[in-house]
């Protein structure tokens, strides 16, 4: 009987808007077969972003972006709102997890050469999403309103002030004045809650649309049976085997999503979101710390001493690094996909990741002055 | 009835120009006030106030080259509110008896400096900047000596302004 009712409802919609056809169009996309698990990171990130939006919206029921009050509002959410600690914890650990898996997703794409023609734009749009998500993380750290937030705002706006020519003005515009004030917090709030999420919400569909347009060009192992040479672009159009997105790939996506969600949830409950002390501009013994994903950059700031060189650590190195990352598909234009057949790219990638891990580890070490 | 774009290429061009113009007008009309809102802080004059720091006779008792941290509270207008900005003034007396009124913010990126008596240095907990008691950079990445607060001495009392000397870009604070 239910089957009959379902069929009737389906027919009602199909007659008017052809719903089944639309759904099939989405679900029957063909995905290369062998690398299934490696392709789950993209949907995992979409899943994590959805969780960030949902938890974020309801955190706003209590949050106030006013400097002395913000930290108390966060504290109230954690300790006095019913199950608020879980909501806040999911928002924090979800953010960390998202940045972590963004790096994994990017590495996967990098090592399997999936950014190569015709998918250059796919990579560029992905880089936009990456940059925005990192800024979302940093602004979120500032919105907690604790002591670290206060110094993070000051340090990062001072970093911005070393941009050539417009630096000083940029700092004032970002802060809404020369001092870190109510208006600074309101700016950060607007950026974190409205501006950047909208950018992400716009760019995720573009990212997905581009996959559809350029076709799924999987890892090199999808093309073992192909007789075409590697430098023939046609080789990468037809993988050996494909499966429909729904349910084959979606099933894998959901299993990974559940696994990661469980970890986030457990961390939210048992570790939670540390709130930290109220900001004290007068503190004489406080050592500000950055979030883990910013430690590598933080470490970079310790080098390049003096007036002439400071611009390297605050502007040139990060900017050039980002430009190279954005332009990667236009720099590396060979047709080889397999990481073993393009050793230079693979070795450089591994070295870069090792450098990142190394800088993060030494950047996270306790700093001497605070403890002397 | 007017012709459709398929019937007349010039009509098509005309319609495209009008569509473009309308988009441009609406775009510019919105962008101007939005830009104004974003850039507004550049046109605001900063609220500069004098605040009493301490009596000179009290400062005379400071040991030479031993910084004393004295908090000041600037009452300034910020946006739509009047706020109190708590800030540290680091008073240092050199061996000839001159006073220096430093900010405790690192000139690198603005972290709060720690005075380490054992080493007689200010150390920055963020990126390892080091300054001696007279504010000179002696190690790490800071690009310039410590900021000095604008100050004046009137009738045995030191007043401090929420402004640094020799700081054209208004960094720090």
Image: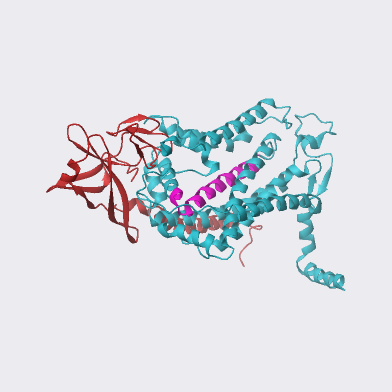
Chain colours: A cyan, B red
Q: Nearer the viewer, residue B9 or A112?
A: A112
Give residue A224's quadrant in the image: top right
Q: Is residue A308 above or below residue A82?
A: above
Left or right of A140, for residue B84: left
Q: Residue furthest top?
A: A344
Q: Residue at x 44, y 55 (%)?
A: A187
Place of residue A26 in the rendered image (x, y in percent of width and height, measured from the top left): 75, 55
Left or right of B5, for residue A178: left
Position of the N terminus of chain B by quadrant: bottom right
Q: Is residue A130 magenta?
A: yes
Q: Nearer the viewer, residue A285 or A316?
A: A285
Q: Is residue A222 magenta?
A: no
Q: Is residue B9 visible?
A: no
Q: Is residue B172 visible?
A: yes
Q: Residue furthest left?
A: B155
Span shown in magenta: A120-149
Q: Nearer the viewer, residue B65 or A102?
A: B65
Place of residue A135 in the rendered image (x, y in percent of width and height, measured from the top left): 52, 47
Give the dominant element type of the magenta stretch: helix, strand or loop. helix
Left or right of A4, for residue B145: left
């Amino acid at each position: 009987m239910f089957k009959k009712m379902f069929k009737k409802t389906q027919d009602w919609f199909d007659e008017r808007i052809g719903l089944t056809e639309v759904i099939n169009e989405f679900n029957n996309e063909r995905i290369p077969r062998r690398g299934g698990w490696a392709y789950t990171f993209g949907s995992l990130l979409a899943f994590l972003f959805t969780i960030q939006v949902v938890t974020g919206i309801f955190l706003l029921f209590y949050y106030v972006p006013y400097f002395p009050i913000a930290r108390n509002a966060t504290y109230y959410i954690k300790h006095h709102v019913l199950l608020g600690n879980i909501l806040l914890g999911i928002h924090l650990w979800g953010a960390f997890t998202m940045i972590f898996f963004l790096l994994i997703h990017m590495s996967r794409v990098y090592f399997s050469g999936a950014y190569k023609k015709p998918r250059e734009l796919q990579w560029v749009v992905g880089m936009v999403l990456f940059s925005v998500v990192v800024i979302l993380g940093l602004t979120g750290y500032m919105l907690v309103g604790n002591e670290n937030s206060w110094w993070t705002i000051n340090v990062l706006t001072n970093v911005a002030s070393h941009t050539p020519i417009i630096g000083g003005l940029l700092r004032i515009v970002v802060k809404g004045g020369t001092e870190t004030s109510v208006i600074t917090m309101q700016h950060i709030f607007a950026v974190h809650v409205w501006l950047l999420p909208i950018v992400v919400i716009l760019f995720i569909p573009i990212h997905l649309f581009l996959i559809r347009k350029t076709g799924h060009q999987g890892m090199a192992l999808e093309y073992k049976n192909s007789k075409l040479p590697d430098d023939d672009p046609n080789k990468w159009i037809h993988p050996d085997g494909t499966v429909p997105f729904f349910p084959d790939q979606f099933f894998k996506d959901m299993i990974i999503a559940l696994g990661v969600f469980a970890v986030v949830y457990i961390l939210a409950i048992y570790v939670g979101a540390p709130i930290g002390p109220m900001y004290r501009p007068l503190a004489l013994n406080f050592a500000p710390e950055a979030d883990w994903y910013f430690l590598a950059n933080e470490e970079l700031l310790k080098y390049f001493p003096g007036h002439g060189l400071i611009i390297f650590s605050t502007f040139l190195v990060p900017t050039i690094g980002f430009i190279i990352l954005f332009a990667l598909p236009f720099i590396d234009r060979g047709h080889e996909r397999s990481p073993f057949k393009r050793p230079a790219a693979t070795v450089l990638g591994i070295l870069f990741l090792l450098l990142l891990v190394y800088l993060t580890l030494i950047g996270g070490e306790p700093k001497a002055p605070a403890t002397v | 009835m007017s012709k459709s774009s398929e019937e007349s290429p010039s009509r098509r061009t005309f319609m495209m120009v009008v569509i473009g113009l309308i988009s441009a007008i609406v775009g510019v009309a919105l962008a101007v006030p939005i830009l104004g809102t974003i850039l507004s802080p550049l046109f605001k004059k900063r609220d500069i106030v004098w605040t009493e720091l301490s009596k000179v006779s009290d400062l005379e008792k400071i040991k030479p080259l031993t910084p004393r941290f004295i908090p000041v509270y600037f009452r300034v207008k910020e946006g739509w509110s009047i706020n109190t900005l708590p800030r540290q003034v680091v008073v240092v007396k050199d061996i000839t008896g001159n006073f220096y009124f430093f900010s405790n913010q690192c000139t690198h990126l603005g972290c709060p400096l720690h005075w380490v008596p054992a080493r007689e240095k200010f150390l920055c907990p963020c990126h390892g900047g080091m300054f001696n008691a007279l504010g000179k950079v002696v190690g790490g990445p800071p690009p310039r000596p410590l900021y000095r607060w604008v100050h004046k001495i009137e009738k045995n009392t030191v007043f401090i302004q929420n402004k640094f000397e020799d700081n054209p870009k208004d960094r720090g604070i």
